[in-house]
Image (tube, helix red, strand yellow):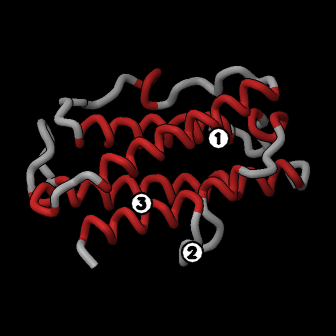
Amino acid sequence: MSEVKRILDQLQRAWDGEPFHGPPVHGILEGVPPPAAFARPVPGTHSIAEIARHIGTWVDVVRRRLGGEVVDALPDEQDWPGAGDSSAEGWATTRRWLDEVHARLEQAVAALPEARLREPVAARDYDVQYMLHGILQHTLYHAGQIALLKKAAQDGGR
């Protein structure tokens, strides 16, 4: 299997497949009702919705960088966008957007020639392969946070 296909496989598993570590991101978000998505069952933390929007932001940044766009550090309000509309439809919109940005990243990775993996990312000190592994790590790190917050919200913060 080529490295591009291996990375694509890992992206798909992490999002909505059968990853080694446990449930995929899409599965973790499934069944999170709007009140839980916007709650702060652990004081001083981001909400599930804020973390979800943060994940989506960085998935999209990686896709844009793959397209050659120079995306430097994001200002705080873009890095950690607000939770968004706290209605049921607002939460559904956030989840659809997450699925869309992830699908666009998968499409971009699927179209990558193997040689691009060793090319430097514009304005960064790493290559494309490192960045793609990094977005997987970033996404799964935050998925773990979401899983804990989901449990805490279900348990009423106990």
The tally of labels here is: 3
First-in-chain label (3 vs 2): 2
Q: Quadrant of residue 2?
A: bottom left
Assign the N terminus to one quadrant of the image: bottom left
Label 3 residue SS: helix
Q: Amino acid at mark 3?
A: Gln
Q: CA distance from mark 1 to mark 2?
A: 23 Å
Residue at 37% from the left image edge and 48% from the top image edge: 107
Q: Is residue 141 above or below residue 56?
A: below
Picture disc at residue 2: none
Q: Amino acid at mark 1?
A: Thr
Image location of residue 126, percent across then percent down: 15, 52
- Residue on which disc 3 sits: 137
- Residue on which disc 2 sits: 21
Image location of residue 99, percent across then percent down: 56, 43
Picture disc at residue 45: 1
